[in-house]
Image (cartoon, grey):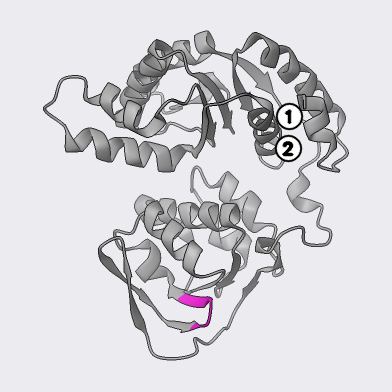
Amino acid sequence: MDLQQRVSVSGYVLDAAQVAAVERLEELQGRRRGVYLHGPVGRGKSFLADALFEVLPGPKKRVHFHSFFQELHRRISARLHERGAVAKAVKELLGRAKVLAFDELHVHDVGDAMLMTQLLEELQRRQVMIIATSNYPPDGLLPDPLYHDHFLPGIALIKQMMDVVSLDGATDYRHLRGKPRSRFETGEIVQECTPPGPPVELEVNGRAITALGIDDTKVWFDFGDLCEKPTSTQDYLVLARRHDDWVITGVPRLEHRDREARQRFANVVDVLVDADVRLTLVSEHPLSEILGGEVRDLDRTASRLELINTTG
């Protein structure tokens, strides 16, 4: 099945910008060139990147950028004084994969920028084809003018290894709500939702995570327990396999929380979307206030939560 056929079986009708992007991706598919697909949120970047990934021959691996980077950091730290620590960590994470799909690539931290450059060098050495989506064009990565120059070698590698494709159609598909197409989309944002019973301690990856209550496969968490304590994406993956209906209470305005808490919340949403878990957020604030203010890198989270937003 080629890319055009893979897109067609989805049942979606593509707009002009998406058609142009598909035609460009088909050209690159034949050349086995990497792809950097960027544009505003809600334009279908992940959908088209997933379609391209599906039609490419393996071995291949698809990851969310932040989760992959978090695990890469952990594995490098575990062998900090070994020669070739980055190469060994990448080998462990990729295995035999010759195609790597990154969803939601972004670089705002100078430390991550330096590591990202090393990662790109290693992927180039291993001749891995990269499919990446991002809300930023390559030159917009690490936008802070104080540090941007530190990532110029990484930007040069992105342009060398990948063809840059823009998807910037006029329609933001987050706002075209129809019948839910997934279990996740049946969720909601409400002001009240009472847990069913006493809190319980859940054993996850060797640590205890507090749940406010459990009712069969439905679980209640407090935002603070889930996102303001040292939980990880791997924890959320385990919990998503156990429980297919989540309620998160006490969701605050994220501009009043630190970067780590905001990133954990974004990771929770990503995991639940991918696992097709129903999500209810309990908050005194509408979504526009939860995600409002001077908060970076939550465009994808906003796009996904628009699917369950019933409060404005």
Residue 168: image tag: 1
Closer to us: 41 or 133: 133
Q: Is residue 217 above or below residue 110?
A: below
Callout 1: few (<14), some (14-19), or many (20+) C-alpha neighbours within 10 Å?
some
- Locate residue 113 relative to residue 298 in the image: left or right: left
Secondary element type, mark 1:
loop
Closer to us: 90 or 118: 90
Q: Residue furthest left?
A: 81
Q: Residue at x 51, y 70 (%)?
A: 243
Q: What secondary structure predominates along the stretch shown in magenta?
A: strand
Mark 2 or mark 1: whose residue is earlier in sequence? 2
Q: Position of residue 177 (x, y in %)?
A: 81, 57
Residue type, mark 1 in image: Asp
The CA distance from mark 2 to mark 1 is 7 Å
Q: Is residue 97 above or below residue 181?
A: above
Q: Position of residue 54 (x, y in %)?
A: 66, 32
Residue 185 sits inside the magenta stretch:
no
Contact between labelled residues 1 and 2, with CB atoms less than 8 Å apart = yes
Image quadrant holding the N terminus, namely top right
Secondary element type, mark 2:
loop
Residue 43: image tag: 2
Q: Residue at x 33, y 19 (%)?
A: 118
Q: Which residues are magenta?
A: 215-220
- Locate residue 200 relative to residue 3 in the image: left or right: left
Q: Is residue 252 visible?
A: no
Q: How many marks?
A: 2
Callout 2: few (<14), some (14-19), or many (20+) C-alpha neighbours within 10 Å?
many
Q: Position of residue 213 (x, y in %)?
A: 44, 83
Which image quarter: residue 142? Answer: top left
